[in-house]
Amino acid sequence: MGDSLTRKIIRSHMVAGSMQPGEDVFVKVDQTLTHDINAVMTYLGFEQLGIPTQVKTSVSYLDHNLLYIDFKTPDDHNYLRTIAEKTGVYVSRPGNGICHMVQTSRFAVPGELLMGGDSHTPSGGAVGMLSIGVGGMDITTAMAGVPMRLTMPKVVKVNLTGKLRAGVNAKEVVLEMLRRVTIKGGLGKVFEYVGEGVKTLSVPERLTIANMGAEMGATSSIFPADEVVKEFMEAQDRGDQYKAFLPDPDAEYDEEMTLDMSALEPLIALPHQPDNVVPMRTLKEHPVVEQVFMGSCTNGSYSDFAKAALVMQGRHVSENLQCTAGIASKQIYKQLLKDGYLDMLIDAGVRILELSCGPCCAIGQVPPTNGIAVRTSNRNFRGRAGSPNANVYLVSPETAAATAIKGTFATAEEIMGEEVQRLANIQEPVHYIVDDAMIIPPLPEEERAKVKVLKGPNIAFLPVPEKPEKNLCARISLKAGDNISTDDITPAGAEFSSMRSNIPLMSKYCYHRYDPEFAGRAKELKKSIIIGGENYGQGSSREHAAINPMYLGVKAVIAKSIARIHKGNLINHGVVPMIFEDPADYDRLDQMDELEIDDFIGQIPTREVLVRDVTRDFTFKCRLELSDAQLAVVLAGGQLRYLKQQLVKMGVLKVEALEQ
Ligand code: F3S
């Protein structure tokens, strides 16, 4: 039997482990990416190692928070730029665009392996590069040249048939996937898209689908590198880096599904989860929409905006509605300008924002109180847009543009009638405007020693956890519900994002929107345990959702299930992730109960831990769903300590480094 794309890439990068789904496999990485609001801790850890990046292509993006509301973010950007210069990392400067679009356009190579410190890293799967979102300390590990641990995923063959109709976007493909698979259904899987339908999708359309595979909890999503990818890379003046990369004709898959794109119609994800998907035509109510945001890494491509512009051409954004555009890169911006689409958008009343993530992570354009917002981005968790009571709906750019014109939910066809067919004529440029002046290449090695790494007062320290305690006695500082997102744990937004390099400051706002008393309570308790429901820690990859609770003394999270990247971050930062053996035990516990775990450090290696609720006088069992490698990290007291031990063994670091 032949291999899928996923298995081919893992096989060719594997240095140890097993390719049996669910088992640990250790791989060598070709590319890493980080971005400004997650990366400072990654580089503070890497800086301690005193070595340059060992990865062929490491890129640091300054793309998320460009508001500079005070000194903090510019301080972060100075640090990230100078540490990159010191360590041989590319820097994509503010204004060049959003990491996933730039990485796919300017760096991605079919058949390579990318690890990114962002959950939407799978976007690179659009060109046949296996691209996986991981935590910040994992990036530190990859950059140190130590093989990365992956849980070998199952591979799901998604057979795409048919062709999208005019007015229906690749967004509908992935919303339909979410409707079928749900936000948990991709756990431990890579979705591999094949079939005749794939040939009809451009690279940016594939990017939209791969990007939002993250919302299914998938390890990644990937497309073949075929003629469409060849044309895209040639249009980027990168044809010499193209190589055809296809699954074997007799490739074996763990699961299969089929999706007929011809049958798709405009879809919408209702608040507050991206899998809450229904057809637009079934909406009973048509309330006044107050905000429309088009763009983000998901739907910020040339075609997305050209189509939105055609929907809006000669019309005007509804009164009392704010419509903004976050174009994904400078390259796309210039092409839209050249081809007249930017004019159409501006004439329609669209406000063009900076080339950054912006509203997608609540950096500007927060909806009004109880506001209704329609967005083309990828997440509509409660609070993600910066307001705890806003209702955010996710749609395609065509639907977003139509909604902005009508002032309530509308499809492109409703606005354009038969003219909607014009949307089918929009194609990606035959040749993009290529100008990498906003990318700083790595300095020659001999010049790196002269670089002075700039650390303003906002750059604090990387807190390093202790090893698990012999006997743990701690109260429950929080009993959280199902689907807690990393946005709930560490709020997004311009103000909070700029605190991410300063854990003592940011930890004061841990769970700020979900339970404003949490941080004070956890700090007072000194050590505590968090209880969670299903899918704890879903969403963004930000490791601060592990670092902040750890800094406040949280020693363990016990939940019904824990999202993949967040579980990795908890392990990396010394918080033991545990799963209820019997989910009914969740209901028997209450906040502030006192829990006791005898011989915690001795029980951990057995992967079964008995916990006694002293307050209610009962004992329950937890499982540790950890591989041998993950157990080693937990027992070492987190990834940085573990990584240093590995580097000492490899002779890269001296034994004294273990004490630093
Ligand atoms: Fe940025 Fe939002 Fe994408 S924060 S990387 S545009 S998911």
Image: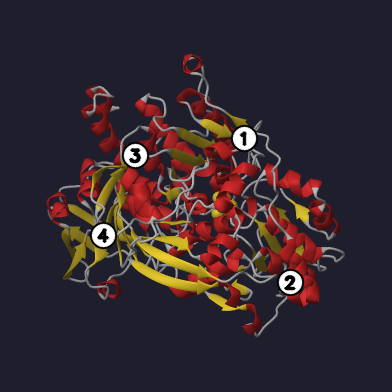
Amino acid, disc 2: Ala
Residue depicted at x 44% and y 42%:
503
Which residue is labeled 2 in the image? Answer: 412
Q: Label 4 neighbourhood size at 10 Å, few (<14), some (14-19), many (20+)?
A: many
* Image quarter of the C terminus: top left
Tell me which numbered mark, 1 or 4, is placed earlier along the sequence.
1
Report whether the residue tagged 3 is closer than 8 Å to ligand 1. no
User: Which disc is residue 578 wearing?
Assistant: 4
Residue 526 visible in rendering: no
Amino acid, disc 4: Met
Identify whether 370 is placed above or below 83: below
Residue contact at pointers 2 and 1, CB within 8 angstroms: no
Residue 258 visible in rendering: yes
Identify whether 398 is placed above or below 47: below
Tell me which numbered mark, 1 or 3, is placed earlier along the sequence.
3
**496 or 349, which is in the foreground?**
349
Tell me which numbered mark, 2 or 1, is placed earlier along the sequence.
1
Mark 3: secondary structure: loop
**36 or 423, which is in the foreground?**
423
Identify whether 262 is placed above or below 233: below
Which residue is labeled 1 in the image? Answer: 93
Comparing marks 4 and 3, which lies closer to the viewer? 3
Tell me which numbered mark, 2 or 4, is placed earlier along the sequence.
2
Tell me which numbered mark, 2 or 3, is placed earlier along the sequence.
3
* Image quarter of the N terminus: bottom left
